[in-house]
């Protein structure tokens, strides 16, 4: 059992489990990029965005960065591999409410990063997609969800 804040992150990981590349959570980047690429979730702190007095509900948004790293011998191969990892993320998340735990999921456009702190950095391409989860809790935001 977990609080709603943790439950939404766990549900996101489960939803992304349908991706061909395994998704890790808050892992340090390995020394070398796996051949299939790398997906790593880094949850940020939840932000309270509203409070409904009559209903006793708190509204939250939780940004979660999805770090992406791919490798390829040429810029063309890196761009293609990056696109192959990014595309399924949208397919898996757009329109999902994570089993009713969230009201809405917003995805940012991928922001590419050319300076990846791993061995063989010259053959790597990295990026980040910010996934923002919108959800509600009761008055007590630390209440355990069943």
Image (tube, rainbow, N blue to C red):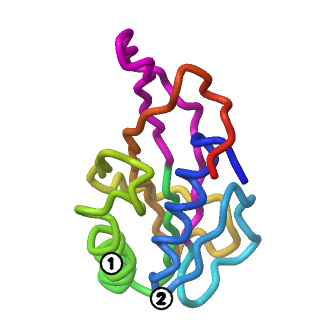
Direction from residue 130 to residue 43 in the image, left or right: right
Q: Quadrant of the N terminus?
A: bottom right
Direction from residue 2 to residue 111 in the image, left or right: left
- Please check the rendered image and state whether residue 128 is part of the magenta-colored stretch, yes or no: no
Q: Write the start and end of the magenta stretch as one range.
A: 39-64
* Residue 88 tag number: 1
Q: Do tag 1 and tag 2 residues touch (Cβ < 8 Å)?
A: yes
Q: Crowdedness of circle 2 by 10 Å Cα count: few (<14), some, many (20+)?
A: few
Q: Nearer the viewer, residue 1 or 24?
A: 1
Q: In the picture, residue 14 is in which quadrant?
A: bottom right
Q: Crowdedness of circle 1 by 10 Å Cα count: few (<14), some, many (20+)?
A: some
Q: x, y (%) of residue 24?
A: 65, 68
Q: Which element carries disc 1, helix, strand or loop? A: helix
Up/down of 82 relative to 116, above or below: below
Question: Label 1 to label 2, Cα distance in Å?
Answer: 9 Å
Up/down of 123 relative to 100, above or below: below
Q: Nearer the viewer, residue 139 or 64?
A: 139
Q: Which residue position is annotated with label 2?
A: 20
Direction from residue 57 to residue 11 in the image, left or right: right
The outermost residue toward the left is 95
């Amino acid at each position: 059992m977990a609080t709603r804040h943790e439950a939404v992150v766990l549900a996101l990981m489960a939803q992304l489990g349908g991706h061909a590349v395994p998704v890790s959570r808050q892992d340090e980047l390995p020394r070398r990029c796996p051949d299939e690429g790398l997906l790593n979730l880094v949850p940020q702190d939840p932000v309270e965005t509203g409070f409904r007095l009559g209903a006793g509900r708190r509204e939250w948004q939780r940004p979660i960065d999805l770090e992406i790293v791919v490798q390829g011998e040429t810029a063309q191969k890196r761009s293609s591999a990056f696109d192959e990892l990014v595309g399924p993320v949208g397919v898996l998340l757009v329109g999902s409410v994570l089993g009713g735990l969230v009201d809405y999921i917003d995805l940012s456009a991928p922001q590419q990063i050319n300076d990846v702190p791993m061995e063989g950095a010259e053959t790597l391409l990295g990026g980040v997609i910010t996934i923002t989860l919108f959800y509600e809790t009761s008055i007590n935001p630390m209440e355990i969800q069943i």
